[in-house]
Amino acid sequence: MSSTIIPFGPQHPVLPEPLHIRLVMEDEKIVEAIPAIGYVHRGLEKLTETKDFTQNVYIVERVCGICSVMHAMAYCQGIEELMNIVVPDRAKFLRVIWAELHRIHSHLLWLGLLADAFGFESLFMQVWRDREKVMDIMEETAGARVVISANAIGGTRRDLSKEQMVKINLTIDEIKHDLEQVESVFLNNYTVKHRLVGRGILTKADAIELCAVGPMARASGISMDLRTTGYSAYGQLDFEPVLHNDGDNYARTYVRLKEIYQSIDLIKQAISKIPEGEHLVPVKGMPPKGEVISRVEQPRGEVLYYLRANGTKNLERLRLRTPTFANIPSLMKMLPGSQLSDVPLLILTIDPCISCTER
Amino acid sequence: MIENLEGIAIDQLLAETQKCKYEGYRFITATCADNGDETIDIIYHFDKDYVMKNYRVTFNKGEAVPSISKIFLCAVLVENEIKELFGVNVTDIAIDYGGHMLLSEEELDSPMLRRQITVEKRGGK
């Protein structure tokens, strides 16, 4: 059979950011997929070499809005290790609270986009209405909705009052209640399941082979969640990674949906256990020197920061590997054998973040 | 400050990578850094059960480095990135974008390399 090449993207309704995939088709079936990126490469890694190591916190937050708290968290943890800064316990819990709020808003955003992609507009609206509640918490506690600059080297720039924590507790209870209403639509509705079950299967063996991370890996049965290593305050909280074994679109939806409940529980635990005290220690001494690797679990999976400092205020090298960068090879494995009509949903289920990927 | 960091020669790279795969490690990524002299570092990061293993390969600019993408296919993107941004001659990449994964024709060559600024006096004095 003769083959046809269809360019998918870089502009497509399902993609908020530009990603191009060259699809080699036989009839309606994909036989090969080759990705092309580079449309929004910003050179942020190079930019960090020209800025003070304290200013870089604001640059790494702008790698990606949705995971901005975790980017800053990973960077600050790296610098703190290099400079032997002991972060106050209260700051560790505050970091967890803001990070998990970001995970909730990221997963709600993704669920809304998924509903929009399969044409369920009212479901999209319901989910994004709850996301707005998280954005309001961000604005009230940190002064901004997306890039909140909560982290600083040595702790957090802001503290949470008791009243704010009570309000967060009430709001996440509301979100949990609302999510329970829509959960059955995502997981049990006949039409929705028809678009998700058995589509875009990534087997456990393939996920291991292609080094998938985050919900992509967990939906294929790999128990991998860096939060279980106990960084920040996660070591003092009880939780287990959310897993599913089917590796299809449905499994990835299931994992992200259940992780919202998990984040709500983690925030509640953090609020109940947060100690009194300082939330920021001053940065003293010489600028950082040496090499360090810092890893945290973002909504899309593991992010790695490599920092090399030479004792001056400028870093010699800052390198970051984001989860979408790690998950693109898995997408290339999932696409061949699928139908053209499933491509938008398949791409969406890796939760692609191109601004992260290109930095 | 980096756990399990070991320096290896270029000709050990494929064997060590293969060994990592047999031992059940996953490839996380590779980090390239210009050392500011005539050498470049590439650090290959692997992980197994949250324990990292890192291999540092130091080589002169212009020297060829074999691709590990035949062992870990997921290294394709990062190797193309290193090839373009640092001008490293990574050979035999499973999918080679030919220097145009990120960069277009008009871009600077190897924009992540450090550049030496030389002040030239007028009139050659």
Image (tube, helix red, strand yellow):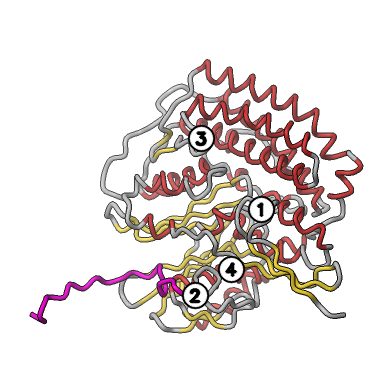
The residue singled out by tag 1 in the image is A15
Q: Does the residue at mark 4 contact the one at mark 2 (Cβ under 8 Å)?
A: no
Q: Residues within 10 Å of mark 2 (few under 14, many from 20)?
A: many
CA separation in Å, label 2 and label 3:
36 Å
Measured along the vertical axis of the image, is residue B125 above or below residue A225?
Answer: below
Left or right: A128, with B80 as reference point: right
Q: Between tags 1 and 2, which lies in front? A: 1
Across and down, in percent, residue A2 comes to 84, 80
**Subunit that carries the residue with mark 3:** A
Compute the Cα span from label 4 to label 2. Answer: 10 Å
Few, some or many C-alpha atoms within 10 Å of disc 4 (few <14, some 14-19, many ≥20)? Answer: many
Q: Chain of mark 1?
A: A
Foreground label between 2 and 3? 2
Tell me the number on the disc at residue A272: none
The residue at which mark 3 appears reads as: A95
Q: Which residue is mark 4?
A: B77
Q: Could you confirm whether marks 3 and 4 are on the same chain?
A: no
Where disc 3 sits, the SS reads: helix
Pointer 3 local density, CA inside 10 Å: few below 14, some 14–19, many at least 20? many
Q: Amino acid at mark 3?
A: Arg
Residue found 53% across the figure and 30% down from its top: A138
